[in-house]
Image (cartoon, grey):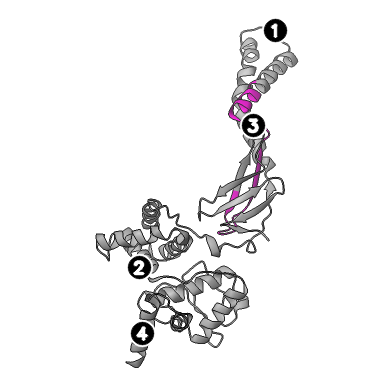
Amino acid sequence: MAAIINATRAYSTLAAPRASTAPAKRARACAARVAKKTRGSVATRSASQDEAAVSPNASVSLSCSIDDPSSCSLADLEMLYIDALWNFYNGGSFTLSDEQYDRLREELNWQGSGFPTLRRYEVQFVEASIAYARGEPVVTDEEYEDLKRKVKAEGKRDDVTALLLYTKGQELLDPAQFLRLKDEMAKLDVDVGLRGATCTMSKTSDKLTSDSSAVTKMYLAIGAVPTVLGLTPYVLGSIFGFDIPFTAGVGFGLTVGALLTASIVNYTGLQNAEIVKGECPCCENEIKQFFGGESPENSVDYKCGVCGTTSKLNRTTMKIDQAGGIKAA
C-alpha cells in the first residue's frame, strides 16, 4: 500500500507545474523503477539475467543492455528512456530501477542527447490517437480536441510527438491503421516519423556517391523514342525499295534522334544531370536525389519518404550536411 501511495505522489508531482528542481528530480527518479517492460514496449536486459529478453521494438538493438550503456547506440538509449517514462505515465508501472534510470540519464547527458522529458498530455494524446486509428476511441471527442490544441500550441515539441506516434504506432497498429494515423496527424502538421534527437550523424555514413548508371539509364530512356523517329525514314525507305546507303541512313537517324533528345532534355530541365545516393541518417533507408538544370543547385533539402527526416544533401562536398536539424560533425 505504501508503495502505491508513493507512486501516486510521484505521479502527481510530475503533473504539477515545476516550482523547483527538487520535486522534478524526485519525480523523474520515481518514473524509472524497472524490471521489464509490460505491454509491447522495449525490453531491457540485466546482465545477471540468465536469458536475454527479446525486444518487440525493432528500433532498439537486441545487443543493447541497460547495464552496459556502451552496447547501445544513442537512439537505443533514447528509446529506453522514452519507454520508461511512457510506461510510468501510461499506467504507473515502474520499468527501471533508480540505479538504472540514473545510469541511463547520465549516459544520455554524456552523449549530448538533450532529449526532453515526456509530458503527460503528450502520452495521453498519443494513446488517444492510436486508439482512434484502431477505431476504438478511449476519450470523448471534446477531450481529444483539447489534447490536439495542446499539441498544436507546443509546436516546438513536434519532434517528440512525432517520435512517440511513430514508435508506439509501429508497435500497436497494423499497417493500414498506421497509415490512417499518419494521415490524421498530417492534418495537425505533425509528420509521424523518427526525427530530432533520435537522428544522429554518427549512426550512418554522411557520404554521398554519384549514381552514374542511373543517369545513363535516364538519358537512354529519354532518347529511345526520338532515335526511333530518326531512323524511321531509313527503315521505311528500305522497305519500299529505296536505295539508301546504310551509313547515311543510320547516321541521319542517330543525328536526328540526338538533336530531338537534346531538345527534350533542355526543355524539361534535365541537362547537367547528376544523381547522388546515400543513407538516411535516421532510418538508414537509401537516399536518391536528382541534381540538374541549366545551373544545378549545390545543395537541396531531401525529405525521407520512410521516416520523414529532412536532410541537406550537398553535391559539391558529396556529403549530408545535416539531418533533422542536427549538423554533421
Q: Is residue 66 in view?
A: no
Q: Mark 1 points at which residue?
A: 243
The one nearer the camera, 72 or 153, is 153
Q: Which amino acid does label 2 sit on?
A: Gln
Mark 3 or 2: the one toward you: 2
Q: Mark 3 points at which residue?
A: 220
The one nearer the camera, 80 or 212, is 80
* Element at label 1: loop
**Which mark is drawn over residue 124?**
2
- 2 or 1: tag closer to the N-terminus: 2
Residue 51 spot, x, y in % from top left: 52, 83
Residue that appears at 57% across and 48% down: 302
**Which mark is drawn over residue 9?**
4
Quadrant of residue 150 within the rendered picture: bottom left
Quadrant of residue 145 within the rendered picture: bottom left
Q: Magenta residues?
A: 260-287
